[in-house]
Amino acid sequence: MTPDPDRFLSDLHTLRSFGAAGVGKGVQRPAYTEADIAARDWLAERMKEAGLAPQFDPMGSLFGLVEGPSLLIGSHSDSQPEGGWLDGALGVIAGLEVARAAKEAGGPPVSCVSFQDEEGRFGVTTGSAAWSGALARDKVDGLVDPQGVTLPEARAAMGDRLGDWIDPARFTGFLEMHIEQGPVLDTSGEAAGVVEAIVGIRDMVISFEGQQNHAGTTPMDLRKDAFQALGAFNSLLNDRLRNVVTPATVWTIGHVSLHPNAHSIVPGRVKFSMQWRDGDPDRLDRMEAIVRETAQEIAGDRGLALEFGPMLGVAPVAMDAGFRGALREAAEETVPGRWREMPSGALHDASNMSRMMPAAMLFVPSIGGISHDFAEDTDEADLVRGLQVLAGAAARIAG
């Protein structure tokens, strides 16, 4: 099979038009928004035109299916609130193009997919997690986004598109092509990265509640200031984690909601996200213990109420050795000497797929290592090279 680079790039740019931010190539296409659903409707039509059978599952993930057993290739088409045009979208359109080229060539059998809510409006890789069982399906309807919208409320916008769960047994494995979202390939001048393993991630929301009060008349030593508690927590946590982490370990407070968020009021409540990532499950556990102990100590010392939200996360996973071998061979054939094996510091749908079937990932460079930003980009020549590596691996695996 021979994928068509021009058709591939044309579809990739068309997908960018759904939720285009008007700033560079950036997009705003969070899960279940009008732009996200319109993009999925367009993808369904493109699948149908390619001779694939489009089918939505109960989460809104969209599959383009061939008859019988097949290799599944894809990623996600939802974006961050301020997202780049390639994060997830690249893997979706690459999967569509390889499936389309395989169909035109008479085989091998390849299906494609765009998973819903990989970016985590309602959790962590929500769509593929629910399909794979990494997220218990009876917990799905209890998920709530940062604005207080429940998942069932948001999903209702998809109307009668939703169908039944797809039987994972029909797929022989999963491949995902993605931008690196880091600087390694771009800095080294290499064209491709074969992913060895994907780090694990833990994510939860923590709340401190103190006493809202007048900012001018409340003495500092009598305040129960929730934001001061967050600042103290952040500083103490950094000190305590220093002795248990590695240079590859990361942790982030990425979302903060302060109440009442006014100039002249001592904040009475703060709710914030706490996320950490590492490749060692024991280290993730130790970090969780430190996060909880530190929050409890801060709340106790300052007389604040403390609440921990549900723990969300995915365990570290190694990619399938056989599929990685196919990617290595295809990379050496396509870009000889200009590829490497590497870990993924970002979480991807392939993590959940590895629970059900052999799975592997391919990276292409991110210019400047920038992602989750309107400035995210990759040279189109590197996008096409990645597509060729992906197609070569698919032919080796499914052929």
Image: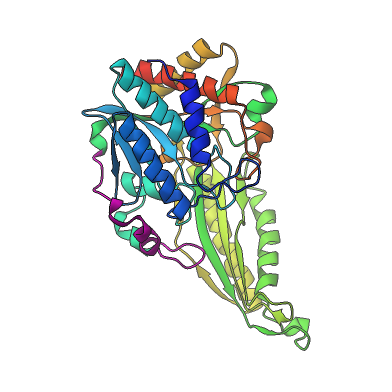
6 inside magenta stretch: no
Left or right of 96 in this view: 332: right
The number of callouts visible is: 0
**Residue drawn at 37 percent across, 59 percent down:** 157
Q: Position of residue 126 (x, y in %)?
A: 41, 50
Q: Is residue 27 visible?
A: yes
Give residue 92's quadrant in the image. Answer: top left
Q: In which quarter of the image is the C terminus?
A: top left
Q: Which residue is drawn at 56% across and 60% down?
A: 273
Report the side of 226 relative to 87 (left or right): right
Residue 291 percent coordinates (x, y): 57, 59
Colouring mode (rainbow / by chain / secondary structure / one colour)? rainbow
Residue 318 visible in the current orientation: no
Give the farthest residue toward the bottom: 217
Point out residue 312 in the picture as x, y percentages from the top left corner: 45, 55
- Relative to 357, is 393 on the left or the right? right
Q: Give the range drawn in magenta.
A: 143-167
Q: Which of the two residues, 345 or 335, is positioned nearer the viewer here?
A: 335
Residue appearing at x 63%, y 41% in the figure: 246
- Residue 107 vs 237, above or below: the answer is above
Q: Nearer the viewer, residue 379 or 332?
A: 379
Percent x, y for residue 346?
54, 40
Q: Give left or right: position of 258 versus 391.
A: right
User: Which quadrant, please, contains the N terminus?
Assistant: top left
Residue in view at x 37 percent, y 45 percent: 41
Magenta segment includes 147: yes
Please identify the quarter of the rendering in which residue 221 is found. Answer: bottom right
